[in-house]
Image (spheres, rainbow, N blue to C red):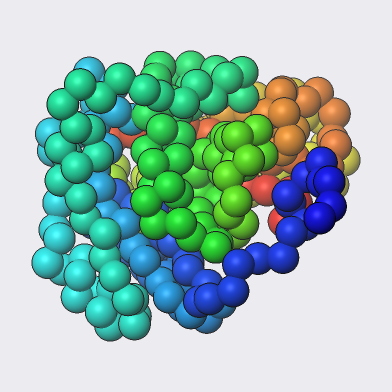
Amino acid sequence: MRIVSSFRDFAPEPGPTIGLVPTMGALHEGHRELVRRARAECDRVVVSIFVNPAQFGPNEDYGRYPRQLEADCDLCAAEGVDAVYAPELHDVYPDGFSTAIDPGEIASEWEGAFRPGHFRGVVTVVGKLFNTVLPTIAYFGWKDLQQCLVVTRMVRDLDFRVRLEFVDTVREVDGLALSSRNAYLEANARLIAPRLYSELKRSGEAIEAGGNVQEELDQSRLVLRDAGFDIDYFAYVDMKSLESLDTMLLPSAVIAAVRLGSTRLIDNYRLHRQA
Ligand code: AMP
């Protein structure tokens, strides 16, 4: 017998490794990239598809969020997925459901500020997925950068025995990050939308090259407003704490959420792709 103070380094249990890709469906090439990583690295691959009402605000798009289970299953089958976990609402939230995970301070700014309760809904359902699927590795996209950090914190704080892997954002040729919500963009908005990433990249590269943080951010905000974007936030932040930075520090990222008409887009540019 030995006395241990941490189970982190304990030998993993024998048996197949399980890769989990949590999604809300309406799968696209971005999701496909996560699935491919899981397929390459794990013995079994599970894709979960669940449009989680708890992470939508009362005036958000839960009702009209695209649902296409059959096409999603075809994509998963083509990528060699072993199981699609598509629970019903009552499977995830049985009668009298009342317990939740509080993601704390890291979830209070940026997306958390504009979408109160969003990350509480996310981490609660992700925690449930970890408990049901028991993945060895779970795959998330850097596109939702704050989500990556919030889930990382939850896994550490609550000792979930899962490894997390983050996958670079898959983009259209014009730079627009793939998103299930891109389908909402009207033709004109679709033409303007790639400017979000071009400004994230431009200001990120300028900061990387020693440019003044405030000036670069202001310039990008101006360009985007002129192009017709409403900006929720466009900020340069520390990648660990998500606090705003005035000067260049690594690891860091330029993060943004904008609205084009009724469509809300989020994206980011990570300096140096470190971390
Ligand atoms: P969602 O279905 O939007 O909840 O996304 C499921 C997972 O796919 C999340 O981890 C996202 O960050 C990730 N994801 C969404 N869009 C992309 C993209 N364009 N490239 C890579 N990963 C993505």
Q: Does residue 175 sit above or below 208 in this rendering?
A: below
Along the horizontal axis of the image, is 204 left or right of 187? right
> Which is nearer the eye, 255 or 21?
21
> Which is nearer the eye, 121 or 259?
121
Along the horizontal axis of the image, is 54 left or right of 44? left
* Count of residue discs: 0
Q: Does residue 152 sit above or below 171 in this rendering?
A: above
Q: Residue at x 21, y 66 (%)?
A: 72
Q: Residue at x 32, y 76 (%)?
A: 82
Along the horizontal axis of the image, is 96 left or right of 145? left
| Image x and y of residue 80, in percent | 34, 82
Q: Residue at x 25, y 79 (%)?
A: 77
| Image x and y of residue 146, in percent | 56, 36
Along the horizontal axis of the image, is 194 left or right of 28? right
Image quadrant assignment for residue 259: top left
Q: Is residue 205 visible?
A: no
Image quadrant assignment for residue 266: top left
Q: Does residue 170 sit above or below 140 in this rendering?
A: below
| Image x and y of residue 267, in percent | 50, 43
| Image x and y of residue 49, in percent | 27, 54
Q: Residue at x 65, y 65 (%)?
A: 12
Q: Does residue 206 sit above or below 70 in this rendering?
A: above
Q: Where, quadrant-wise, is the N terminus in this rendering?
A: bottom right
